[in-house]
Image (cartoon, rainbow, N blue to C red):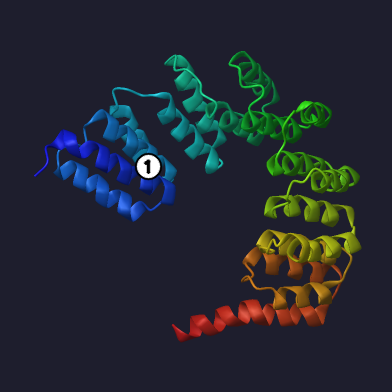
Amino acid sequence: MAKPHKLVPFYATLLDACSSSKHLKNLKRIHALTITLGISRNDFIRSKLVSSYACCAQLHEANILFSFTIRQPTFLFNSLIRAYSSLNLFSQSLCIFRQMLLARKPFDRHTLPVVLKSCAGLSALRLGQQVHGAVLVNGFGLDLANSNALINMYSKCGHLVYARKLFDRMWQRNEITFSTMMAGYGMHGKCGEVFELFDKMVEAGERPDGVTFTAVLSACSHGGFIDKGREYLKMMEVRFGVKPGLHHYTCMVDMLGRVGQVEEAEKLILRMEVKPDEALWGALLGACKTHGKLEVTERVEERVYGRELSFASSV
């Protein structure tokens, strides 16, 4: 049998695979094996375990292991900051960042975009501006991920003018850049700017993705642009090969429901390929009740609640 220290690289690779796939069951099995083989206390393996549990959103386990890790490198702090932020636990994410600062750990280009996301989630503009300073001081001003995160932060904190200035100054942009700026405009009711940016994005040769179309359809919904909404939904699949998902259909149902076209919204739900969730049916039901569409209301309630009742009676 191989000596414990020779097993470390192999098990580190297995743990990386668990992080990538977010496969918690496999992670627990591999963790158990590292204990059996006597390598779980190896600092490198322990670091990989922290990162893997964080990637699998098991923050309690990740924090316990983190507290026992002697060397706490930058990537380990990054893993925890990202894990909390991905679960919308923005305050906790920023607490880990403060721990990182107190431990005098250096940033890398992966640290600050996640911190900026947490600032955006909390609308913490002042802190976001301080992090912007750290981006510049640490030489990440031209990094695409950091620039995109700054646009997101300023947009969500209501500073659209400054977000657009950053956008216009960027020497390189991708679909995330355009989608982020469009989402910012849409969030604040600037629908014309959303459509203008979409056209610029296509002209620039960037390919819109599902996130882009969520931003566009949301703007159509909030602005009451019914025809444009139908046009963009068709364009998604026919022109760009993007299959509509629940977010896109929810935007469409909300848009049609606002103007009382609940019959069209119902037909849209019935012919879509993805399974409708409670939010989608709820949006349609809300529109039916607002516009007094009793027949559609009865049909929807039969589909949603009727199935639930029949399932309950069979149990």
Question: Which residue: 82% across, 75% down?
Answer: 264
Q: Quadrant of the N terminus?
A: top left
Residue farthest to the left?
1
Q: Against 144, is 182 above or below?
A: below
Q: Nearer the viewer, residue 242 or 153?
A: 242
- 111 horizontally vs 19: left or right: right
Residue 166 in which image quadrant: top right
Question: Which residue: 68% across, 33% down?
Answer: 148
Q: Position of residue 111 (x, y in %)?
A: 53, 27
Question: Which residue: 63% across, 70% down?
Answer: 274
Local crowd at mark 1 within 10 Å, few (<14), some, or many (≥20)?
many
- 102 horizontally vs 46: left or right: right
Q: Quadrant of the C terminus?
A: bottom left
Residue farthest to the front?
205
Question: Which residue: 82% across, 66% down?
Answer: 257
Q: Name the residue type under label 1.
A: Ser
Q: Position of residue 13 (x, y in %)?
A: 32, 42
- 7 horizontally vs 267: left or right: left
**Count of numbered badges drawn on the protein:** 1
Q: Nearer the viewer, residue 196 or 104?
A: 196
Q: Against 272, is 248 above or below?
A: above
State the SS at label 1: helix
Q: Which residue bears the numbered disc 1?
A: 52
Q: Position of residue 7 (x, y in %)?
A: 19, 39
- 125 horizontally vs 309: left or right: right
Q: Position of residue 61 (x, y in %)?
A: 34, 40
